[in-house]
Amino acid sequence: MAAIRLAAPGAGDLGWIVAEHGRYYRDLLGLPLSFEAKVAEGLASLVLSPADGRSAVFVAWLGDERVGSVAIDGSDPQGWGRLRFFIVSEAARGQGVGRALIDSAMAHCHACGFERMYLTTVAGLDAARRLYEASGFQLADAHEDATWGRRLCEQRFEWHRPTEAAQ
């Protein structure tokens, strides 16, 4: 098995991230093309406004194949970091790629001094949820949402830096 390599995005990587999200969520949940467009918009905004080094995108590779991504958006004026664009290709699941991406994202958050982070997702993505919870994220909210033309249970997970007393 090839070693997992994480890198900053290069030529073609942003397009891959957008396409992988579009395909995965279309096939799994039937989400429309407008979802893929929203991913493209958010990713472009993050890359074009890097928030003084607090934002980052990581692309995972196995050999010569792109197999995953994750990003941290540090642009929130209230100081929240946001974990976004986490995905692992079908062929690479179960090989530690997701763990490597989340660990790298959390290391970035610690290095940048984030006190709190959040992510939004939908119910039913159990493998991803296990990774989030193993990294200290806790479910903070769940509600029904029909933004994409069908009812989904949208979830918000939050992470707060442990205090000295709690460590």
Image: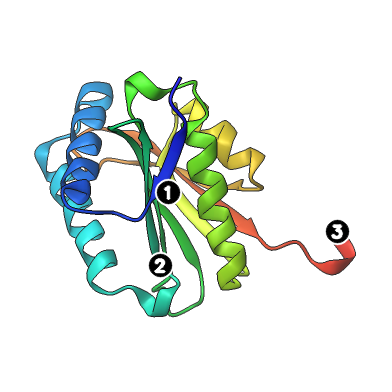
Q: At 43% from the left edge and 80% from the top edge, which residue is drawn?
A: 77
Give the labeled residue for mark 3: 167
Q: Residue at x 48, y 43 (%)?
A: 101
Label 1: which residue?
120
Examine the rendering and report whether any part of residue 121 can be seen: yes
Whole-number angstrom distance, CA of label 3 to CA of label 2: 26 Å
Residue 86 visible in the shown view: no
Image spot of residue 150 (x, y percent)? 23, 32
Q: CA distance from mark 3 to mark 1?
A: 26 Å
Circle 1 packing at 10 Å, graded few (<14), some (14-19), many (20+), is: some
Q: Residue at x 37, y 77 (%)?
A: 51
- First along the sequence among labels 2 and 1: 2
Image x and y of residue 47, in percent: 26, 65
Is residue 158 left or right of 35 when viewed as pictured? right
Three-letter amino acid code at disc 3?
A: Gln
In the image, farthest residue toward the left:
33
Distance, label 2 to label 1, CA atoms, is: 17 Å
SS of the residue at dot 2? loop
Examine the rendered structure and indicate whether residue 2 appears above or below residue 86: above
Q: Name the residue located 66 percent from the left edge and 61 percent from the top edge.
A: 160
Q: Position of residue 154 (x, y in %)?
A: 40, 41
Judge from the rendering whether residue 46 lies leftward or rightward of residue 5; answer left or right.
left
Q: Amino acid at mark 1?
A: Thr
